[in-house]
Amino acid sequence: MSLLVVGSIAYDTIKTPHGNAENALGGSAVYFSLAAGILSPDPVRLVGVVGDDFHDRDLEFLRSRRIDTAGLEVVPGGSTFRWSGEYSADMNSRRTLSVDLNVFQDFKPKVPASFRDSKLVFLANGPPVTQMSVLDQVAKPAFVMADTMDLWIQTAKPDLLQLLSRIDGLLVNDSEALLLTDTTDVISAGAAILELGPSRVIVKKGEHGAILFERGKIIPLPAYPVRGVRDPTGAGDSFAGAVMGHLARTFKGRSGGIETRAFKEALAHGTVAASFTVEDFGVARLAAVGEPEARRRFDEYRDWLAL
Amino acid sequence: MSLLVVGSIAYDTIKTPHGNAENALGGSAVYFSLAAGILSPDPVRLVGVVGDDFHDRDLEFLRSRRIDTAGLEVVPGGSTFRWSGEYSADMNSRRTLSVDLNVFQDFKPKVPASFRDSKLVFLANGPPVTQMSVLDQVAKPAFVMADTMDLWIQTAKPDLLQLLSRIDGLLVNDSEALLLTDTTDVISAGAAILELGPSRVIVKKGEHGAILFERGKIIPLPAYPVRGVRDPTGAGDSFAGAVMGHLARTFKGRSGGIETRAFKEALAHGTVAASFTVEDFGVARLAAVGEPEARRRFDEYRDWLAL
């Protein structure tokens, strides 16, 4: 089933206790597409914007990973979004050193005609108004999931609430879930978000896994354990990519929607993808993963959880 | 299979954002025994000390829960251990308001003759020297697990390392595991503790679940989700109790020791027991749980994790 992602494409400069990376290919849509591409039967449809400083080799790299770049807008004379950050010693927190939004500042996603029939849609983190503009450009998606962040919860809550009424799934981290719902525990927070519209909420807890909320169901899943995390950048976006990539190969558009089991499997693939991402800087490790290797970790994870 | 626990018996005064409890029956050995008693086929053997202010009704209550109190020492003229603490708004941290160790200060565990053949032994948190004194009094245990805390890691590390060389399992929380091994992530910490002696390490992460470490295996399990935690006191000790209680009914003493599957099930029962404990103050909720109710939550949890 066709999968569309709209999000950022960036060059990241990253410092962690284990080393540095300079101007490494990154951005939510890149991590998402690479992870989704491991599982999705069809090429992942990418909508994003870069400047004409975007390297040809990176474009070729994305295409080589079965990513459909028909929706990649190149702004002549513009610069690609650049982000720089530094992680704490335990890597549980990070500090942004610099942000140059550049061409991403005024990003107005344009969904190409060939992408308008997309059945699965992921709206990576961005202004809710921009996220909604994508929904106006797709014909009849079967399942739309969105990410968001504290900035939009604090500065654009009315827009965000409107977005929530138009989507099927929300993916947020634990602190964002608490902020959005003004609660003090993630269980209450996830349940409260369901009341705002989405039929599925995934609360990500980083190294502690994720919780899937459906009406009447709260399903916790642990993270695939990684010894020696080198760079956590992109873990959440690759998690999202694998979730949607697995749905793309599982969901046949039957009436009744996506089954709980398929969604649980999707979350498991999400944590496996994140486990690869954090093992090296930027997209290096994720880019080297094929379906058989992802499948082996998934099988291992499934066996651990079998009681 | 016979199960022995040695630990504290206390009267706790607890403040949480949801209310207060004054002089409520508590202590590691009490929470442990109640949780273990739900699952263990034989009465749980309790070794501990109280003052003569310990209420007859509490003694009767423990006995009514199939706890063998032959090892309960009553010090004439002494006072029972009293602890008072207050939880933060999100209940992720607590502040000790007062500690009166009283008769627990000089606790020298005396294992009654009738308990010396115990096959499963749990050494609740205490000075490592005291924990080791118990091992000198049991004949030939099949599996010994111990708990510890930051205080002993900081003030009695040589003793603790000696203890680790004599036990089969260690149960610690995540911050203690990092402190003990001087590492910055729990995956490395758990693996490092295996090198210190125990063949099994369980790292507890509170609301985020627990991780089981065996040689060559790292198995993460999520916590049973609870909406509206009222009082986290005793969660870790009831977790331990259900782990050992399940092993008591599963382990037949076959050569080859306890299988990974039995241990995973034990952890699942641990998180279920903790989920009951935190739903009300002190032991109130845990004391009201029977095996069928515990089994229902276990089954639910198992179904969630089935992929």
Image (cartoon, coloured by chain):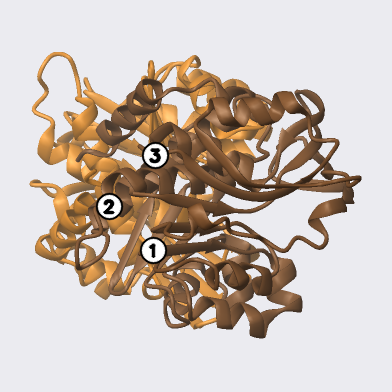
Chain colours: A orange, B brown
What residue is drawn where x is 39% and y is 21%? B293
- Say which mark, if any, is on residue B251: 2
Are callouts 1 and 2 both on one chain?
yes
The residue singled out by tag 1 in the image is B143
Instruction: Relative to B39, say whether A218 is above or below.
Output: above
Are callouts 3 and 1 both on one chain?
yes
Q: Is residue B292 visible?
A: yes
What residue is drawn where x is 38% and y is 26%? B291
- Say which mark, if any, is on residue B59: none
Earlier-in-chain disc, 3 versus 1: 3
The residue singled out by tag 3 in the image is B42
Q: How many marks?
A: 3
Left or right, A69 with respect to A107, comes to left
Q: What residue type is disc 3 on?
A: Asp
Q: Percent x, y for residue A77? A: 45, 64
Q: Percent x, y for residue A60? A: 20, 69
